[in-house]
Image (cartoon, helix red, strand yellow):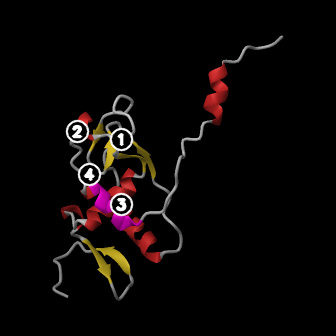
Amino acid sequence: MSIKINKKLEKFSTFDPTKESKPMSIGNLCKDIEDNKLTLPIFQTYIRWKIEKSVDLLNFQLSGKAAVSPISINIIESKELAVPQVSFLERKLISTDDILGKNSVNDGQQRLTCNYKAYIDHEDFKCIVLDITGGEFTLNTGVPKKF
């Protein structure tokens, strides 16, 4: 007895969505968010990291012991095939006329948002300080000191 297998299944099973891989600095990624070159598919969850998790990520990156996990990004090449896109933080809908060529983040939103908030000195991060004597980021829940 033979089973008829759809020809598309073989094509789908060998498809590699990774067209390109390139290293980028956190600063460049934050600049792309700021310039609205980096967007999010509308179905992405909202920011769910607590401040302590953000501090953990910043300290992990600061230690330089290991690379942060890769960020998965798709370049939008077709307006017709693209899902609606929103901006980081404000989650404002981006016009379909403006999405062509944008980089859409499929995985890494929480990490990118954490870094972007630090990059722009976001109000949520005012309590995170770099303790230069301890060599780490910490939470400062008291009144900020002048030094």
Mark 3 vs mark 1, CA separation in Å: 18 Å
Q: Nearer the viewer, residue 52 or 14?
A: 14
Residue at 33% of width from left, 44% of height from top? 40
Q: Is residue 75 left or right of residue 20?
A: left
Q: Which residue is mark 3?
A: 29
Foreground mark, 2 or 4?
Answer: 4
Whether the residues at callouts 4 and 1 have beta carbons within 8 Å, the answer is no
The local crowd at label 3, few if under 14, some if 14 to 19, many if 20 or more residues have their Cα within 10 Å, is some
Mark 3 vs mark 2: which is more N-terminal? 3
Residue extending farthest top: 1
Q: Residue 2 location in percent, x, y?
A: 81, 13
User: In the image, is residue 69 above or below residue 62?
Assistant: above
Give me the residue at 52% from left, 51% from top.
20
- Residue placed under numbered mark 2 in the picture: 93
Under mark 1, the amino acid is Gln
Residue 32 inside the magenta-drawn segment:
yes
Quarter of the C terminus within the rendering: bottom left
Give the CA separation, mark 3 to mark 2: 20 Å
Which mark is in front, 3 or 1?
3
Disc 1: which residue: 44
Residue 44, image quadrant: top left
Q: Is residue 99 above or below residue 129?
A: above
Q: Amino acid at mark 2?
A: Leu
Give the residue at mark 4: 36
Magenta highlight range? 25-33
